[in-house]
Amino acid sequence: MRRLRRIKILATLGPASSDSAMIRRLFEAGADVFRINMSHTPHDKMRELVKTIRNVESSYGRPIGILVDLQGPKLRVGAFAEGSTQLKNGQSFILDSDKTPGDNSRVQLPHPEILAALRPGHALLLDDGKVRLIAEETSPDRAVTRVVIGGKMSDRKGVSLPDTDLPVSAMTPKDRADLEAALPEGIDWVALSFVQRAEDVIEAKKMIRGRAAVMAKIEKPQAIDRLADIIEVADALMVARGDLGVELPLERVPSLQKQMIRMARGAGRPVVVATQMLESMIQAPVPTRAEVSDVATAVYEGADAIMLSAESAAGKFPVEAVSTMNRIGEEVERDPTYRSVINAQRVDPEATVGDAIADAARQIAETLDLSAIICWTSSGSTAIRVARERPKVPVVAITPNLVTGRKLSVVWGVHCVVAEDAHDLDDMVERAGSIAFRDGFAKAGQRVIIVAGVPLRAPGTTNMLRIASVGPNGDAQL
């Protein structure tokens, strides 16, 4: 099944989309990767979903990616004696370590690490930013705050701290247990929530030990300040606009989205744009015009993938949401201005053989109007390097590793085929042409360019270009 767009689609699974028939329909509508949100998914259900996805994958013969999204540290206030209270602008309100149920003057904050790290002047955002406090006096066991934006506060509402660098890991005991359950199932990507620093990603990678790739979710101001370091150690980024829009002024989110996409692309890291992309489709069969423009903007910016959350997990129209996203991607990429926008964002290749070869392959393919760039890849790095260049011609990745094919399902423009590894260079060229012909990327008499590493089966050695013509039977000849 060949997609007619380059941008990939992630669809979150949930109550509205957990059976085999629905997952199959979502894949047919355009989903390339399925997200399992561990905030709401028990281990047994996660295993069931993975098994179902793999059965769908087997029936279509196309690699499908699975992303497990870890919950991360959830910071919450304690309980109130009456279940809730009303905070008024200007009043004093205390957060402390006392377990006694709260009232209009105080409530427990059962996170000593927050009280230890808070400083006067730091903001505290409660209930997704609906209530805003400013710390005036701080100590290890209590913080006296002033209410800047009042409102109703009830039991166990979340706390965000945009100004405070918390000395806590991005992985909680729940996350570790979720990982231990998910990794043996053969998942492909792990999304790490509330990353603050590169060390958070490194810690997760030590536990994962190469069994899955790590996607760092950027949703805290502290991560923005250390973005270059995080990109260097992460395998991919997610622009998690929900919490980012709580902890930062909303008007900053669009520009940060653009910056993150360009930085990730420049570093050759896949980048996913997420949160509220087609939010109204949770309840309605069609999106708003503004939502369509929002999705289109991510496509124009050259993001690798766009993601549906509640729209596909719990909405009334999950298939329609995926289908709508698919159509938006196709239409944007047909726009005559799309290519000029994408080209204008291209960065110079890094001074490595692999990047130089990838850039050369794009230039040659576009200059000679070749039909496709065919990448033979073991680890996936060759295809990722070529995709970084956002070439005009299709990118086909051929790999002997199913794990690699699934990982590449999130990468811009890569049509991945899992096939037996090439025996030698002649076999590599011949089968590249045959696969491009079979999957509709080249016709008899057209030419393709082949990118690979020599010696064969040596990951990370992209160093070869070949131009070949597709013969009348689909085989390729130099």
Image (cartoon, helix red, strand yellow):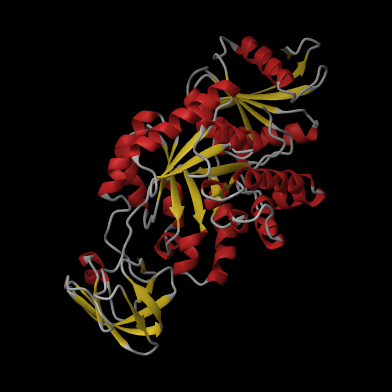
Q: Residue at x 31, y 46 (%)?
A: 175
Residue closer to the observer: 325 or 330: 325
Residue 4 visible in this rendered orientation of the protein = yes
Query: Which image quadrant is residue 3 in?
Result: top right
Is residue 133 placed above or below 390 in the rendered structure?
below
Q: Residue at x 66, y 47 (%)?
A: 325
Q: Residue at x 50, y 33 (%)?
A: 407
Residue closer to the observer: 395 or 345: 395
The residue sitting at the front extreme is 82
Query: Which image quadrant is residue 62 in?
Result: top right
Residue 115 place in picture, x, y as percent: 23, 71
Looking at the figure, which quarter contains the N terminus? top right
- Horizontally, residue 262 falls left or right of residue 391, namely left
The residue sitting at the bottom extreme is 90
Q: Residue at x 56, y 9 (%)?
A: 423
Residue 378 place in picture, x, y as percent: 51, 24
Residue 170 place in picture, x, y as percent: 33, 53
- Horizontally, residue 402 falls left or right of residue 182, namely right
Residue 8 place in picture, x, y as percent: 61, 41
Residue 353 visible in this rendered orientation of the protein = no
- Horizontally, residue 429 falls left or right of residue 172, namely right
